[in-house]
Amino acid sequence: MTSALTMPTGHQLAPSWPDGPTGSQPLPFELDHLLALRVPGLIATRRHIHSHPELSGAEFETAALVARELSLAGLQPRLLPKGNGVICDINGRPDGPVIALRADIDALPLADVKDVPYRSTVDGVCHACGHDVHTTIMLGVGMLLAQLADLGELPGRVRLIFQPAEEILPCGSLEVIEAGGLDDVVQIFALHCDPSLPVGQVGLRVGPITAAADNVTVRLTGPGGHTARPHLTVDLVDALGRLITEVPALVNRRVPANSGLLLVFGHASAGTRYNVIPSEASASGTLRVMDRDTWELAPKIVSQVVRDVIAPTGATVDLEYLRGRPPVCNDARAIGVLNAATAAALGPEGVAETPQSMGGEDFSWYLEYVPGALARLGVGRSGPNVDLHRASFDVDERAIPVGVRLMVLTALQALAAAR
């Protein structure tokens, strides 16, 4: 495709968002009309990205597509040092503040099982978390804000961040920060798809909106042996069973109940033969916790509990505890900006309270440096909704113009409030 915003032939599009929900306000300088013209191309872009997903750290073609589209809008994007992400400033009045908007662009190692024309063409890789939608929305925002900048009506600078590697460790947000992505930024905002909310609603919350998330890998070793004589060796299958059943419960007993700590092993492996006691076994999983103080203590607690549980078995323990990301903690003033922008974009009924999630999000690292907020964008489809990170996940594409309107108004509200 010569341009990601060129409508491909043969694609049936979901209807775009109507002229405006009750109580919503128009975008300035007839940008709603421009957005309406762009909606088919934006949906085509989303479908192209969805059908050509790239894993975390290898988002080179996606980044190139983003840079190409921003350049066509008259902007000057720059690639991250590895070439798998993009930063682009939209320059308005030079005396104004700098507001950042972030989208993540990576996909997951899942097979796409949907029967749709835009199904993934890459075996075992799928946009099952909505990052294709985040990327598309931010492209639309860039095009509209570039128009405002050309008119001399953008009261500051808006930095668009298209971030790689949100789904893995080390986090891609740290690459962006190291590359100067937060230089001069006074506030930062992001959206994340939420299939539990309908299109036209945005979930907002002051304070923590996600959990901290770390990776835990435990490797056990022993001499191995015959299943007829476990007393002559170390039974690693038994040790592994104790690890995955006892450790999560015991870790919970070491922290306050309201910390929301959750240790879940998603992978366990030991042995290849029914009559051979293996010499190696392993388990890996995630530790999630809602409370920042408990997150700071978690590595020491997990290490001690693992060693206490395994010690009686005689197995040797190698524990790898990989720090992931702290909770996303939304700044109250930034949520005030999003509240006002959501009401303007969607009417008062568009604002929805949302609970703290046990999911992790590396947007939290940006908030260690500058205040900001993450909002949940309703993308729920008619019928039973499929949760994030499932191979059949899809969205109601009417959420794309909703997200564009919301983030344009968020940027303008933030620039006005920061002056």
Image (cartoon, rainbow, N blue to C red):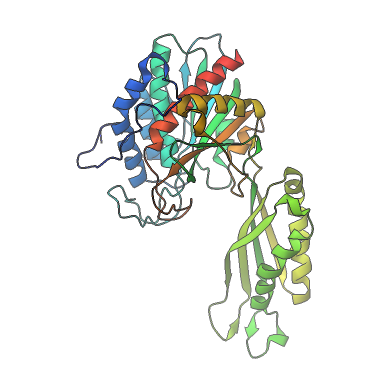
Residue extending farthest to the front is: 22
Q: Quadrant of residue 182?
A: top right
- Tell which of 209 and 289 is nearer to you: 209
Q: Is residue 230 left or right of residue 33?
A: right
Tell me what residue is drawn at x 70 percent, y 52 percent. 260
Number of marks: 0
Q: Is residue 374 left or right of residue 313?
A: left
Expressed as whole percent of the image width and height from the top left, the position of residue 175 reads 56, 36
- Tell which of 242 and 375 is nearer to you: 375
- Tell which of 356 and 26 is nearer to you: 26
Tell me what residue is drawn at x 62 percent, y 38 percent. 364
Whether residue 197 is visible, yes or no, is yes
Q: Is residue 410 left or right of residue 72?
A: right
Q: Quadrant of the N terminus?
A: top left
Expressed as whole percent of the image width and height from the top left, the position of residue 186 reads 61, 21
Expressed as whole percent of the image width and height from the top left, the position of residue 108 reads 46, 50
Residue extending farthest to the bottom is: 228
Q: Is residue 127 above or below residue 275?
A: above
Q: Is residue 189 above or below residue 324?
A: above
Whether residue 88 is visible, yes or no, is no
Q: Quadrant of the C terminus?
A: top right
- Tell which of 144 and 57 is nearer to you: 144
Tell me what residue is drawn at x 65 percent, y 34 percent. 206
Q: Is residue 71 above or below residue 381?
A: above
Tell me what residue is drawn at x 36 percent, y 23 percent. 71
Q: Is residue 414 left or right of residue 55?
A: right
